[in-house]
Amino acid sequence: MSKAGFDFSNVIRNGFLEAKGIPLPKATSTGTTIVGCLFADGVVLGADTRATSGPIVADKNCEKIHFISENIRCCGAGTAADTEFTTAMISSNMELHALSTGRKPRVVTAMTMLKQLLFRYQGNIGAALVLGGVDDTGPNLFTVAPHGSTDKLPYVTMGSGSLAAMAIFETEWVAGLSRDAAIALVSKAVQAGIFNDLGSGSNVDVCIITKDRTDMLRNFLRPNEKVEKERRYKFARGTTDWKKDREIV
Amino acid sequence: MDHHPTNWGRPRDDRVDPYGTFPIHARPRPKEDAFGDAVKHTQQPIVTGSSVIGLKYKDGVMLAADNLASYGSLARYKDVQRLHPVGTSTILGAGGDMSDFQYIQHTLDSLIIEEFTYDDGNKLGPTEIYQYLSRIMYNRRSKMNPLWNSLVVGGIKSDGESFLGYVDLLGTTYQSPTIATGFGSYIAQPLLRNAVDEHPEPLTEEEALSIIQKCMKTLFYRDARSLNKYQVAKVTAEGVTISDPIEAPTVWGFAEGIRGYGAQTQ
């Protein structure tokens, strides 16, 4: 028997558990700086690569630019599991939809699927997304917030580093940027997040989407590489003495 | 008539209702009166200023702050000067509660006058003002009665070097070539750091002014408690100057072709 409307039984269960002294487990959050901007030929998306679990860096080089379809990508900020599963689900449904309609998938379709899913869960799915792509209607760029609202803008940022990245965009974005200028701007914005926000760090991923092709530049910049150690810590053979020598075949 | 045996033989306390239902083992205690001391301690800021930004450049230091004092979400006072000259070589910028800032201004003015009356050739420079303020702010926080401000102290020291420091309501202090308080720490600080940190040479006056204008413009775009009317203060070897109010030019054409927030095309 399917009940109509929203099902909040888990919310009630969680409240009960919390009252008993069992708090909600701390989700791995992507902390994050994710950005997107329109340029002359399409869309450029950018993201940092740090995943945090509270104050600890859980993953130094995670991938935050998710595949939706060949011509559409989605950056995800917020709870890592939520962004991962949400984008995977919509990607899967987009493929089925494209086969069903016989048409190249459109960005507004993915956007609508995402917002309807997130609204249904009333913000309990912690996914803040930057969705971009080029389809038959042209280049498109949207943000989708955890509660299901969307914004249509020429340049967007999300995540804890969004203010630092947006400061860069507000001072330097202009319409009709060239491909290289757009990549440079997006890298600069993500780097502002990496160096000024503690929830973001490590490397810069960039993805350029145009009408004809999509280029995923994983680790486009690596401004935080580990410095080579000054000493060698390997022990030479013979440092430790041995009494017996037996070969096991 | 007080029925509770624990109160027999003790002075009568009229703040207590003797017919309330108390567990017998607990003496009835007077209800805590928040205004009993006639003084309130831990507070919330009422009339507030937003960000203050500052940076060191070739000739000295430059500070900027907008002319708004908000009353919650109301843009109440739109011609407030949040930059205050102290003596001849220091400038103080403040965000946070404006009444506490006015008290600080008054205290510092009295201090400068007192120093003047000693007539011993000593001047209070930015380092002295900074130390004095950090003592006051930490002392107030330790009494759980803070002056609810974030302060930026900038100036030229007696040896000619420039000085830029931050003090806040908790007594936190630090010095840096670039400082931004409030919303500015999220939005302006990345821009200031990009301009100043990588530069091997100190910025010229034009460059410093340009980066300040960019920061104030971006703050007006993105801070919901800001105003597009700000002043820039400059401290150089010549002294302290505070500019007239400036309006940053803003660009809104980016949204010209956009309709709706999603699938809408018309």
Image (cartoon, grey):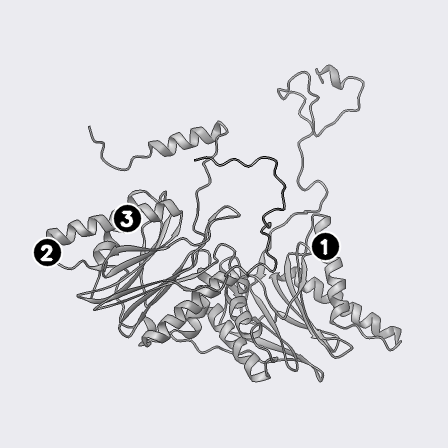
Q: Residues within 10 Å of mark 3 (few under 14, many from 20)?
A: some
- Give how far apart the Cα atoms at labels 3 and 2 are: 21 Å
Q: Are marks 2 and 1 in contact (CB under 8 Å)?
A: no
Q: Secondary structure at mark 2?
A: loop
What is the chain letter for disc 3?
A: A
Using the rendered image, report if marks 1 and 3 lie on a common chain. Answer: no
**Residue B176 showing in the rendered view:** yes
What is the chain letter for disc 1?
A: B
Q: Which residue is mark 3?
A: A88
Q: Which mark is residue A50?
A: none
Percent x, y of residue B39: 71, 47
Q: How many marks?
A: 3
Question: Quadrant location of residue A179?
Answer: bottom left
Q: Secondary structure at mark 3?
A: helix
- Give how far apart the Cα atoms at labels 2 and 1 are: 69 Å
Q: Which mark is residue A102?
A: 2
Q: Quadrant of the C terminus of chain A?
A: top left
Q: Which mark is residue B138?
A: 1
The one nearer the camera, A125 or A104, is A104
Percent x, y of residue B4: 71, 16
Residue name at image x 75 percent, y 67 percent: B129
What is the chain letter for disc 2?
A: A
Mark 2 vs mark 1: give the one in front.
2
Mark 1 vs mark 3: give the one in front.
3
Q: Residues within 10 Å of mark 1 (few under 14, many from 20)?
A: many
Q: Secondary structure at mark 1?
A: helix
- Give how far apart the Cα atoms at labels 1 and 3 are: 51 Å
